[in-house]
C-alpha cells in the first residue's frame, strides 16, 4: 500500500514514490498513458515534468483528462522548447511564453508546484531574482495559476540561498548516499565523476546536511531526483564501488530530513512497480546501513545516518527520530516550534534512556548514542 507524506508546509499530501517523466515519450508517447494508468492504480499522486517537449506535454495533458484532481503536478518554469530542442532560459519573455504553452498543452488551469528550473550557480540565482523570474513566479502564485513556488538544484549552497532569500516552498534536489559525500559545486558533472570517489571521503558533506535541516525547520518539502544516481548505484558501474538496491536508495533518501517524495525515473511500468514495491518491503530489504558501511574509501564513523540499526531500544525510544530532532535543534541554536512539537509527539523521549548501551553495540557507524540521548534530554528538558 502506498505511503504518503505532507510536502513541507504546502498542505499537499504526496505519495512517497512519485514519477519522473524520463520514459514517457517512449513508444511514440504511448508510454505516457500507460504510466499514468499504472500510477493511479498504484496510488502514486505526484509527478514531475521538467521536459519541455510539446508532444510529451500534450500526451500528459491527455493522460490527465478526467483525473486531474488525482495528481499533484510539479512542472518547470524556465524549461522551454526552442528550435526543436530543450532549452533552459532566463529570458523573461521566453519564460512567460513557455509557461503559457505548457498550460495550454497540459490543458490545466493551475499547476501545484511551479518549479524554477535548474539553478546550480550563485550568479544564476541572482539572474533569477534580478531578471524578474522570481517576481513572475510570485505573480503566478497570486493569480492562482501555480499553488507553490519551487526550485530545482544540485548545489546545496545555492539551494539554501534561494530558500532563505526567495521563499522557495518546495526544493527538487539530488539525494543519494554518494552525492551526499560531495562538496557543493556549480558543475553538476562533478557529482558523478568517478575520480571524485577514488580518494578517502569522510561522512556527509556538511553543506548538504545543513540544507536538509534548514528545509525541515522552514517547512520546505524536498522532492528527490537522482535517488539511483542515474542508475549508477544499482548496476555494475556503481560510483561508490558497492551495488545498492532500489529499496535501499529510496529508504536512504526518505530518511533525510524534509524529504517527502522520491521521483522514480522509469522506462516501463515494471520499473515503476519496482520502485513502488518499496512500500511493501520489510526492514531488512530497506536497510542501507550495511551497504554504506561497506563503501570503500569512505568513513562514516560518528555520523548518525538515521538507519535505525540501533533499535530495538529496551525503553522503546525511537532513537533515530530523537537524534534527528536533536540535530535540527543544534543547527538552529534553539528549538523551533515544529521541532519541539514533533519531539513532544514521540511516545518515548531521551529522558527515558537508561544508558544501557545496547544501541551502541548495534550501530554500524560507531555513533555515541548515549551522549546524544544526554544532549537531547538537556536540550528538550525531558
Image (cartoon, rainbow, N blue to C red):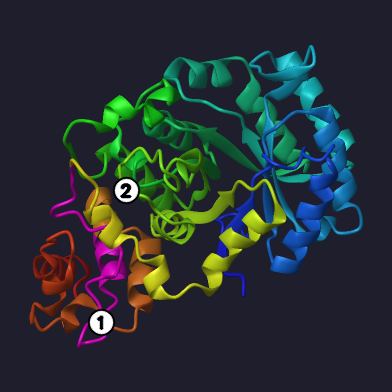
Depth check: give the residue in front, 77 or 344.
Answer: 77
Is 218 on the left or on the right of 93, as rendered? Answer: left
On the image, the x and y values in percent for residue 229 come to 46, 41
Q: Which region shows up in magenta?
A: 298-326
Q: Quadrant of residue 160?
A: top left
156 or 341: nearer the viewer: 156
Asked whether the viewer can see residue 347, the reply is yes
Q: Position of residue 69 (x, y in %)?
A: 81, 59
Residue at 25% in and 79% down:
349
Q: Nearer the viewer, residue 282 or 222?
A: 282
Residue where numbered disc 1 is placed: 312
In the picture provided, is 14 more to the left or to the right than 61?
left
* Residue 109 in view in this figure: no
Q: Residue 28 in the image: x percent, y percent? A: 85, 37
In the picture, the quarter occupied by the N terminus is bottom right
Q: Secondary structure at mark 1?
A: loop
In the visual, does 193 lie left or right of 34? left
Mainly helix, strand or loop, the magenta region? Answer: loop
Measured along the vertical axis of the image, is residue 299 above or below residue 103? below
- Residue occupied by mark 2: 242
Amino acid at each position: 500500500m502506498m505511503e504518503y507524506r505532507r510536502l513541507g508546509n504546502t498542505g499537499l499530501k504526496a505519495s512517497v514514490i512519485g514519477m519522473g517523466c524520463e520514459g514517457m515519450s517512449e513508444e511514440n508517447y504511448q508510454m505516457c498513458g500507460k504510466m499514468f494508468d499504472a500510477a493511479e492504480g498504484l496510488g502514486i499522486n505526484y509527478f514531475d515534468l521538467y521536459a519541455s517537449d510539446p508532444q510529451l506535454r500534450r500526451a500528459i495533458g491527455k493522460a490527465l483528462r478526467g483525473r486531474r484532481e488525482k495528481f499533484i503536478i510539479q512542472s518547470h518554469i524556465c524549461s522551454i522548447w526552442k528550435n526543436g530542442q530543450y532549452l533552459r532560459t532566463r529570458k523573461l519573455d521566453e519564460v512567460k511564453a513557455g509557461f503559457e504553452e505548457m498550460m495550454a498543452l497540459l490543458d490545466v488551469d493551475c499547476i501545484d508546484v511551479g518549479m524554477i528550473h535548474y539553478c546550480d550557480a550563485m550568479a544564476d540565482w541572482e539572474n533569477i531574482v534580478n531578471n524578474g523570474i522570481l517576481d513572475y513566479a510570485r505573480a503566478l502564485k497570486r493569480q492562482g495559476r501555480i499553488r507553490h513556488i519551487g526550485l530545482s538544484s544540485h548545489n546545496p549552497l545555492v539551494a539554501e540561498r534561494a530558500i532563505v532569500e526567495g521563499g522557495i516552498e518546495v526544493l527538487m534536489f539530488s539525494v543519494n548516499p554518494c552525492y551526499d559525500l560531495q562538496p557543493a559545486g556549480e558543475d553538476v558533472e562533478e557529482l558523478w565523476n568517478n575520480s571524485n570517489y577514488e580518494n578517502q571521503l569522510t561522512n556527509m558533506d556538511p553543506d548538504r546536511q545543513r540544507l536538509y535541516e534548514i528545509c525541515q525547520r522552514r517547512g520546505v518539502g524536498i522532492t528527490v531526483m537522482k535517488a539511483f544516481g542515474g542508475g549508477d548505484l544499482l548496476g555494475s558501474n556503481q560510483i561508490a564501488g558497492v551495488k545498492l538496491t532500489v529499496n535501499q536508495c529510496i529508504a536512504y533518501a526518505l530518511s533525510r530530513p524534509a524529504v517527502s517524495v522520491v521521483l522514480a525515473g522509469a522506462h516501463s511500468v515494471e520499473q515503476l512497480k519496482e520502485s513502488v514495491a518499496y512500500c511493501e518491503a520489510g526492514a531488512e530489504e530497506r536497510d542501507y546501513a550495511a551497504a554504506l558501511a561497506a563503501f570503500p574509501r569512505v568513513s562514516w564513523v560518528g555520523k548518525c545516518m538515521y538507519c535505525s540499526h540501533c533499535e530495538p531500544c529496551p525503553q522503546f525510544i525511537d532513537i533515530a527520530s530523537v537524534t534527528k530532532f536533536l540535530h535540527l535543534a543544534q543547527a538552529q541554536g534553539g528549538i523551533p516550534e515544529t521541532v519541539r512539537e514533533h519531539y513532544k509527539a514521540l511516545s518515548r523521549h531521551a529522558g527515558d534512556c537508561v544508558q544501557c548501551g545496547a544501541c551502541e553495540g548495534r550501530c554500524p557507524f560507531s555513533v555515541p548514542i548515549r551522549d546524544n540521548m544526554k544532549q537531547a534530554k538537556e536540550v528538550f528538558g525531558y
